[in-house]
Amino acid sequence: MHRIAVIGGDGIGPEVIAQGLRVLETVADICNVGYELRHYPFGGEHYLRTGETMPEGVLDEFRQMSAIYLGALGDPRLPSGFIERAVVATIRFGLDLYVNLRPIVLYSEALTPLRNKTPKDIDFVVVRENTEDVYIGAGGFLKKGTPDEVAVQDAIYTRKGVERVIRYSFELARKRNRRKKLTLVDKANAVAAHDLWRRTFAEVGAEYPDIEREAVFVDAMTMWMVKNPEWFDVVVTTNLFGDIITDLGAMLQGGMGVAASGNIHPGQVSMFEPIHGSSPKHAGQNLANPIGAILALSMMLEQLGELEASRLVERSVAGLLGSGRISDVSASSGLGTDRVGDMVCEELKRLTAAVPAGS
């Protein structure tokens, strides 16, 4: 019995999560997956109503869960990043979710803006370090609001933090067994601290002679992702660079509406979410495409060991996108949020009617 914490969040978050939960109910019935849900109200609306971001003790509750399923956070009535830091960052750092896993998979060549690229060319995964770098909040302001203002933000990297995410990435490259290649993305030619990444990459890599290694500067990476995405298999990078290049990766696969992510600590409770924001202008209009949230559900099921259910959800999404039945994953697709949820559930049932579960 999997215990799943659900945070719908803000804007379109509750809408896309609702469809993800419909898909979970359908695939759980097909694959005999036992689960129970516990809903949490955290987000901008909750803060504005109660003055509470996330109360003390909730992290202890989350530690007793099997997984956390998050919609999106962000409210334009609050300072930029306030609620995201108060909830998402608190969970990531508090639960030590040191891997941010972001698959970049193209399901239909009609979705990518790249010319002459097909699904066989765009199928890689970015492993973003998730608990260090500039996101730890070390720094501050001097003479704030004056002409002499100084702003400082420190990027912190530790040997432990760098090594564990690099080791995870080597293991993932071996597990994927695709190109068996790991690419490190850094800026070691300009940021001296990134020498720690280079040295650790080389030292850990010596333990994985079966995995090809390469190191790429982040500016070059953005170029090669567009020109030759087929070069990549598993990519490992810093927190900041991973945040940036995976948005580019989302566009390669069709847009933010199709991109999913996992915040993972192997063997412990982890959190799964679409990578899009709360998009307040689309909230409550049944316009947002829930595919990213549904693929995040697939990732969650895989992490929970429900491999059959995970593969079935991904196959259903891939079938709908690959066949053109869903030809646009944006809010202007003409397919309502509910309708896309219907289609995925219908595809799940169609696949399992054709091929019995477990076969």
Image (cartoon, helix red, strand yellow):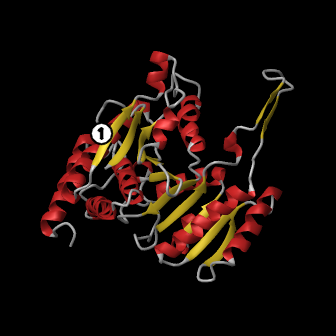
Residue 28's place in the image compared with 76, above or below, is below
Residue 18 found in image quarter = top left
Q: Secondary structure at mark 1?
A: helix
Rendering coords of residue 125 (x, y %): 51, 64
Is 167 situated left or right of 329 in this image?
Answer: right
Q: Amino acid at mark 1?
A: Ala
Q: Is residue 240 visible?
A: yes
Q: Residue furthest bottom?
A: 210
Categorize mark 1 by other alpha carbons within 10 Å: few (<14), some (14-19), many (20+): many
Seen in the picture, residue 76 relative to 257 is either above or below; the reply is: above
Q: Nearer the viewer, residue 88 or 339?
A: 88
Q: Residue beneath label 1, please?
A: 18
Location of residue 266 in the rendering, given as x and y in whole percent from the top left corner: 52, 58
**Residue 322 in the image: x percent, y percent?**
30, 64
Quarter of the image for residue 350 reads: bottom left
Q: Quadrant of residue 324?
A: bottom left
